[in-house]
Amino acid sequence: MHLHEQKTLLTRRHFFARGALGLGLPALAALWPTTAQAQEGRAVGGLPSLPHFTPKAKRAIYLFMNGGPSQMDLWDYKPRMNEWFDRDLPESIRRGQRLTTMTSGQARFPLAPSKFRFARHGQSGTWVSELLPWTARLVDDLCVVKTVHTEAINHDPAVTYICTGSQIPGRASLGSWLSYGLGTMNENLPAFVVMTPTWTRNNDQALYQRLWGSGFLPARHQGVALRSNGDPVLYLNNPPGVDADSRRRMLDSLGRLNQRTYEQLGDPETQARIAQYEMAFRMQTSVPDLMDFSREPRNVLDLYGPEVNRPGTFSASCLLARRLAERGVRFIQIFHRGWDQHGNVAGDLPIQCRDVDHGCFGLITDLKRLGLLEDTLVIWGGEFGRTIYCQGALTRENYGRDHHPRCFSIWMAGAGIKPGMVYGETDDFSYNIVENPVHINDMNATILHCLGIDHRRLTYRVQGLDMRLTGVENHGPVRAILA
Amino acid sequence: MAKVKYDPSADEKTPPAPKFAELIWIDDNLPAGAKAVVDNGVNLAWNFVGKPDPVHSGDKAIKLTAQALQQVVLQEANPPLTVGAGDKLFAFVFLDPANPPKQIMLQWHTSNWLHRAYWGEDLIPWGRANSTERRRIGDLPATGQWVKLEVPAAQVGIKPGMAINGWACTQHGGTAFWDKNGIVTKTPQGSGPFDTLTEWLQYQKSVNGASLPKPYQDLVKQDPKKHNDDHKKQLLKYFLETAYSGTRDIVAPLKQKLDPLQKEKESLDKRIPTTLIFKERKDERPAFLLKRGEYDKRGDKVERGIPSFLPPLPDKAPRNRLGFAQWLVQPDHPLTARVAVNRFWQQCFGTGLVKTSEDFGSQGEPPSHPELLDWLAVSFMEDGWNVKNLMKRIATSATYRQSAKITKDRLAKDPDNRLLSRGPRYRLDAEMLRDQALFVSGLLVEIVGGPSVKPPQPPGLWEAVAFTGSNTGVFKADSGKEKVHRRSMYIFWKRTASPPQMNALDAPSRESCIVRRERTNTPLQALLLMNEQQYVEAARALAERTLKQGGKRNDERLRFLFRLATSRLPEAVEQAELQALLQDQMKRFQADAKAAQQLINVGESRPDAALNPGELAAWTMVANLVLNLDEVVSR
């Protein structure tokens, strides 16, 4: 074939269509589908055996509160604790359980009742703290689970555990499992997007790339960070001085030369590469379009609160999450930091809540408005809870709380989940679970279930072991909260 | 020193150790030698005021009115305050009832400022919360009266023997008066000389012998009654040499000579980089079976050894790493050598003869060519484990030198090339791709060894995840060619936020052991190779190299450039394609000088000013294309 003939035949769409459909290339198949496929709503990539059954949720948004939100100051209302102010945690409650070294040396474990007011909200009458006035308006859409528990007691292993199913680094994260198992529904965006918004206190525990890493799964399944400063996706923008026309012109030549290489050597990877460069070019338009809020109506922006206009805030990230969900991104995870209140719960917890409360309201309300909540699952929660006993100085007005892995509260909403319910019960001290425990592996199995996945059957063989997100012990979805 | 006479009866006259007492450090003046830090931003001048303003002690107090976060700071006080065991730091404060601060803080400087205590809200973000760097002591004191603030030195991480030479009174908002800052201590201030051994021992005991060598430190911490004669002799000798007033005249000039030499030695030592090494412990560390892997549920004690289903350690081998290493490479089994040659094979062919190169066990894949693997393994051992010979054997083999061309027929019969029906072809690893671009363009600095380097990366990647206050919290790129253009194996690696130019191309996170990488093909890689600063810089440098060394005519230059990157000359159609691109880009950049300047200025190195910017920019785009060719990114 002569070059001029190629020129007319091989437009970039043509390249792409040939790459994706004509050859059935393994490397490309796992990547991002064509427009035609996306419009049909079919996923591309993923495993042929998935979903295992008809899913309620097509996608999920996980609002991760990094540091361990204080359950008894937000969701797990314990009015009896007022009588217990400054009294010692009874041994019958503690039962010799492990503490962190931050408080294990304390001479006393004086009880610190929450200083915040609680009220019942909605038809469901769910108790919510005054710190979450906006989220409180949503309770009839939420399923609050008060009995999630974990074994890990410090941040790094605990966050790694809940995000990857193991306390030890090296496993695949929830989002990368979904990308691997279910593939993607969008041609121009990654299947798994991560955001790390700013937070007011700007002082706290670290995050780790592994929380959205792909571990043993191929790296294309790792979460792609969407950034609020600089290039929204790394290296998205052309270098200074190179405009879209110049890039297009370069890509046209590159495509033709690579096509020639393909014709000579016949390596399917070459075809895949041609398609990837075209995809990259399309992302240069689609991503800025995604990030541009200018066509969002005022009343929609208002749902998310005033901070939505400040790029990089939690509210702005929530709106972006909705825009990503609309565009068919499979899994969106927002990591909000600063929830590690060892001291000054009175001063810091309200600031943390202010950061996220309005954004949560905006996200759920907006998804509902667009009908997207019907096939989108939303999860809110951290890696563990906090202790009822005080760390450091205790007054009625202020106190600190250490890490507590034995129970903590999360909420889920949307596709596959019963709305307006509270699940699980803890003792008067929010220390031990008395009814309906939900291990973090149960919770992850529940998330997978909503997305049409049997957690026992989504496996990947590594060093002779069939790895799965939820480990080998007997865990499973929480049937009682499934819609 | 032997001539020095010391009269032990003086010790009997030394009074008993002093009791705790207040020592006022800042009252109406700054302490000796202290310098106020004033920048009229956060750091205000020390404003000593007298009555009618409230004064607690002496004639004056310090008045501080803060707009948000402001403070008064002094540093470099000399002599400093020496802190002993059980000491408490204190200050008096009077909060203006009409305009109280939201938060007040005291800060002390030892070798750093990381000792802070505060009262009230937590608005001042310095240091790590809930630690000695930022310790909350309590609520704000009552306003309109003098209140004593008191902080045990230990609570803010000031240990016995440390010296305080800086002090700050800090406020968030409001007006407050500060007075009578000091320490409750029983430690004699100043470090000598001392007239008697007892005095010196009293002093050393109160500071836990902080500045003494370890054996002396242990001795002074003990009850002196427990010292035997030998101990006493040692202590006396050390005292006479270092701290006795009677020997000062002899010691001082010697010390004057010694001190700079010691400093020089220290700074020399500091310049030698540290590296970590393995060393066997003197005693075996006891090891136990852990029930269900729980670290606190110990089962039987276990001994060092090899799992019993495997051959035992050789009789004479030591029961440690060395013995294990000897066992691993014993000549009577090929297991280790098989694993080793398989990895080198994987490096050359992209896939090992055993595909699961990390797993040769029953769960791994059997080798595609078992006899070949064994032959390579045995000859590797017979060669004395010579890696160069092995690589040469593989690289010069007919199998390796086959064409990578895939025919339909072969693709059907041998889709993954496990039968080696063609030469290997795969995308280069992250490190090799970057090194290749730097090398082809002539930018690569091939120095071997030395500390890790930080080539540029987009801002905010570390900040997005780092623990606040982490020493890898803020990324600062290195500058200088010898840093930023080194081979990728030298790139500094923060595991929780790995270098993006490596991460995007499947470099493992280094959080767990990976011997076999995935090789993915994504649009993010395309964006990286087209737009990342160093790849763009490499394209420009390659363009410069082409213009300077590639001949006078554009067709010559294109051939030169293409050959550098692909090791072959372009065919006519390829040449025509590149020629057309060059002309189009030339037109664009000659018409837009600003764009040309912008493009050629990307990166650490500067473009050659003698070259025409428009021409260089156009060639940069051609080089950018060539460095992105499938043929260039694949081997």
Image: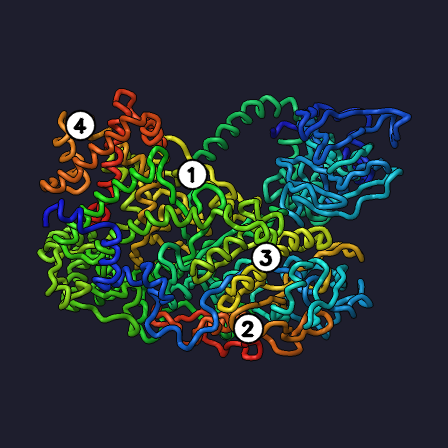
Determine crowd level at label 3: few under 14, some 14-19, many 20+ residues with C-alpha closer than 10 A.
many
* Left or right of residue A16: residue A446: right
Determine crowd level at label 1: few under 14, some 14-19, many 20+ residues with C-alpha closer than 10 A.
few
Dot 2 and dot 1 residues touching (CB under 8 Å) = no
Q: What type is the residue that disc 3 sits on?
A: Gly
Q: What type is the residue that disc 4 sits on?
A: Gln
Question: Which labelled disc corresponds to residue B273?
Answer: 1
**Badge 3 and badge 2 in a common chain:** yes
- In the picture of the structure, the residue carrying the numbered disc 3 is A362
Q: Which of the two labelled residues, at mark 1 and mark 4, occupies the earlier sequence position? A: 1
Residue A464 x %, y %: 34, 72
| In the rendered image, the vertical position of residue A16 relative to residue B594, given as above or below | below
Q: CA distance from mark 4 to mark 3?
A: 61 Å
Q: CA distance from mark 3 to mark 2?
A: 19 Å
- In the picture of the structure, the residue carrying the numbered disc 2 is A417
Choose between B602 and A295: the one closer to the eye. Answer: A295
Q: CA distance from mark 4 to mark 2?
A: 68 Å
